Amino acid sequence: MITEFKHMPNTARVLIYQANRAFNEDELTKLNHLANEFLNGWRSHDMELNACIEIRHNRFIIICIDESFESVSGCSLDKSVKFIKDLEQEFKVSLFDRMHFAYKENEVVKSCNRTAFEELIAEGKINENTIVFNNLVANKSELATNWEVAFKDSWHSNLFPIPSTL
């Protein structure tokens, strides 16, 4: 069962897949069609799942599942991973690279690999106030409050220290 994101409970589980580039308008149309097809057939132990897929910033695929309706089984999670892998092939993007980081520059979402991210930090182009994306959030509530956060408030700051400006 497809439920609009706004009607999902705050406890709904989220899975976030970040593309290494933005999808264009034609790709977004096709992606939304494929997402609806997937959701209409997605089951857990032959039971319909209450879920939705939302695309944000033309590059984040967010799967939201209301597990109070029906729990997601290992097999159904495997099916979602296969769906995402199929999208990688269809659109020639990477959706599983956890060392590809997204951030905002003048309200525009950009992304880069780890090396480039570290260089941007060293150059001061990414600083403690730069908005970064925490794709590790677990539910809709955390998505609303801890997904787009200042670098200084994110797990990124533990991995990539900002150089001091003494």
Image (cartoon, helix red, strand yellow):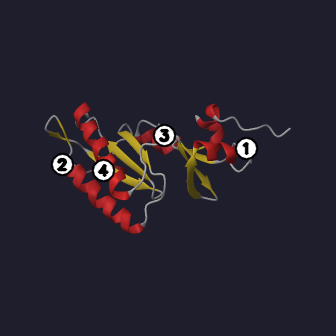
Q: How many marks?
A: 4
* 32 versus 45 height, above or below: below
Mark 2 vs mark 4: in front = 4
**On the image, numbered disc 3 is attached to which residue?**
98
Q: Is residue 40 left or right of residue 151?
A: left
Which tag, 2 or 1, sits closer to the chain's start?
2
Label 3 vs 2, first from the N-terminus? 2
Q: Amino acid at mark 3?
A: Arg
Which residue: 60% across, 58% down? 107
Disc 1 element: helix
What kind of residue is marked 1?
Answer: Ala
Q: Is residue 117 above or below residue 73?
A: below
Q: Secondary structure at mark 3?
A: loop
Rounded to the nearest whole Å, what is the CA distance between mark 1 and mark 3?
21 Å
- Using the numbered discs, state the Cα–Cα distance from disc 1 to disc 4 in whole angstroms: 36 Å
Q: Position of residue 42 (x, y in %)?
A: 21, 45
Give the image location of residue 105, x and y in percent.
63, 56
Q: CA distance from mark 3 to mark 2?
A: 28 Å
